[in-house]
Amino acid sequence: MKPIEPSKTMMATKAWATINGGEHDIRSDYFDYCQVFYQDEENYYGHWITGHTDLQNRKVRFPKETTREMTPEESEKLERLDNHPMIRL
């Protein structure tokens, strides 16, 4: 597994988290924001930024085939959300 430095914010749908020794499907029905810190040939590893906030301290596996770079519009939306006084990601 190779580190991604600096980490990247990406968009993903499929995701798997290890919980109580088993791998669980925590996918999103639509592309959602994730932060990735490591990668191997087939997957990125990190956590969801929105949704599943209870799993932010767990390593989540995002298959590369269903994970992509953000569009400029998605990047702007994330910046607006992060800078909103009532919302902190």
Image (tube, rainbow, N blue to C red):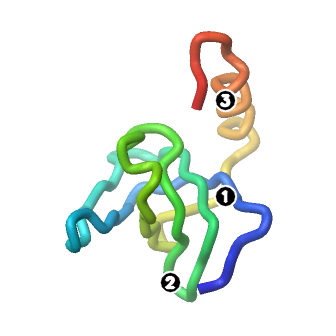
Q: Position of residue 67 (x, y in %)?
A: 53, 63
**Image side of residue 21 versus residue 40, left or right:** left
**Image side of residue 37 versus residue 58, left or right:** right
Task: Please tell me which residue is depicted at 54% across the width and 46% down the height of the picture.
Answer: 33
Q: Position of residue 74 (x, y in %)?
A: 66, 38
Q: Earlier in the sequence, mark 2 or mark 1?
A: 2
Task: Please tell me which residue is depicted at 54% across the width and 51% down the height of the picture.
Answer: 34
Circle on res. 85: none
Task: Please tell me which residue is depicted at 70% across the width and 36% down the height of the picture.
Answer: 73
Placement of 60 over or under 38, stated as above or below: above
Q: Earlier in the sequence, mark 3 or mark 1?
A: 1
Considering depth in this image, is 25 or 3 the residue closer to the camera?
A: 3
Secondary structure beneath dot 2 equals loop
Mark 2 crowdedness (10 Å alpha carbons): few <14, some 14-19, many ≥20: few
Which quadrant of the rendered structure holds the N terminus?
A: bottom right
The answer to which quarter of the image holds residue 23 is bottom left
Distance (Cα) linking label 2 and label 1: 15 Å
Secondary structure beneath dot 1 equals strand
User: Label 2 sits on what residue type?
Assistant: Glu
Circle on res. 77: 3
Mark 3 crowdedness (10 Å alpha carbons): few <14, some 14-19, many ≥20: few
Task: Please tell me which residue is depicted at 67% across the width and 50% down the height of the picture.
Answer: 70
Secondary structure beneath dot 3 equals helix
Distance (Cα) linking label 3 and label 2: 28 Å
Which quadrant of the rendered structure holds the C terminus?
A: top right
Considering depth in this image, is 70 or 53 the residue closer to the camera?
A: 53
**Image side of residue 85 versus residue 67, left or right:** right
Of labels 2 and 1, the one closer to you:
2
Q: Position of residue 79 (x, y in %)?
A: 73, 30
Circle on res. 69: 1
Residue denoted by label 2:
42
The answer to which quarter of the image holds residue 68 is bottom right
